[in-house]
Amino acid sequence: MSPVLPAPVSAGAGTVSVDPLVFPSRFVGTTDIDGWRVKTYRVSPATGSNMLAAARRSVAATLPTRPDRVGAFGVGFLVVHLTECRLLAQLNWWVRPDELYQHTFAAPPENPQALAPLDTAAISGICELAIAAHEGAAWRRHVIDNPAGPDIDAYLKDHF
């Protein structure tokens, strides 16, 4: 059975069709950020390597310096999304067996080095939510519900 997709949405001058199953997200690798292993995704093909590097630098200061002291596993995922009006970077990391912490950063697209934490509530778009849903299912499969015990390496190899 095919999923029921939302109808196109009117957006001023034209119509925008949103298909939550098809969007330009791409896994770009796992990076060590100050001892943390962080899977990285980009949501827009226009998200360049300079934007990914700026996002990794910006989030490094946010992560706890010793994950083992705060109940974290030392792993997480970063979603970098170039929208029409800003560059977004969402850093997510796993704490205790079943908690996901998140910080969101934003900058003007022409100045990715200016990424700074948002001081307002952050809301994910469908692209970020699809990645987070995959990551949650992978975490559950490889860490929480794994009969052999938590397998962090298997989690890190399982990407959207």
Image: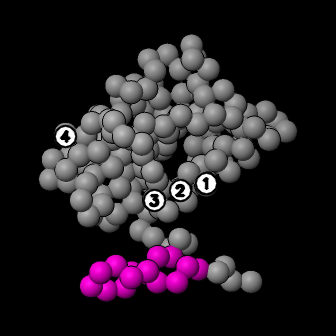
Under mark 1, the amino acid is Ala
Do the CB atoms of the residues marked 2 and 1 lie less than 8 Å apart? yes
How would you rate the neighbour count of disc 2 (Cα within 10 Å): few for under 14, some for 14-19, many for 20 or more? Answer: few
Quadrant of res 145: top right
Do the CB atoms of the residues marked 2 and 3 lie less than 8 Å apart? yes
Do the CB atoms of the residues marked 1 and 4 lie less than 8 Å apart? no
Instruction: Give 93 or 149, whichever is nearer the viewer.
Output: 93
Secondary structure of residue under mark 2:
helix
Q: Which quadrant, please, contains the N terminus?
A: bottom right
Mark 2 to mark 4 CA distance (whole Å): 25 Å
Label 4 sits on residue: 113
Start and end of the magenta stretch?
Answer: 5-19
Quadrant of res 54: top left
Mark number displayed over residue 129 = 2
Mark number displayed over residue 125 = 3
User: Does the magenta segment cover residue 14?
Assistant: yes
**Residue 51 against residue 114 in the figure, above or below:** below
- The x, y position of residue 85, in whole percent, is 24, 59
Do the CB atoms of the residues marked 4 and 3 lie less than 8 Å apart? no
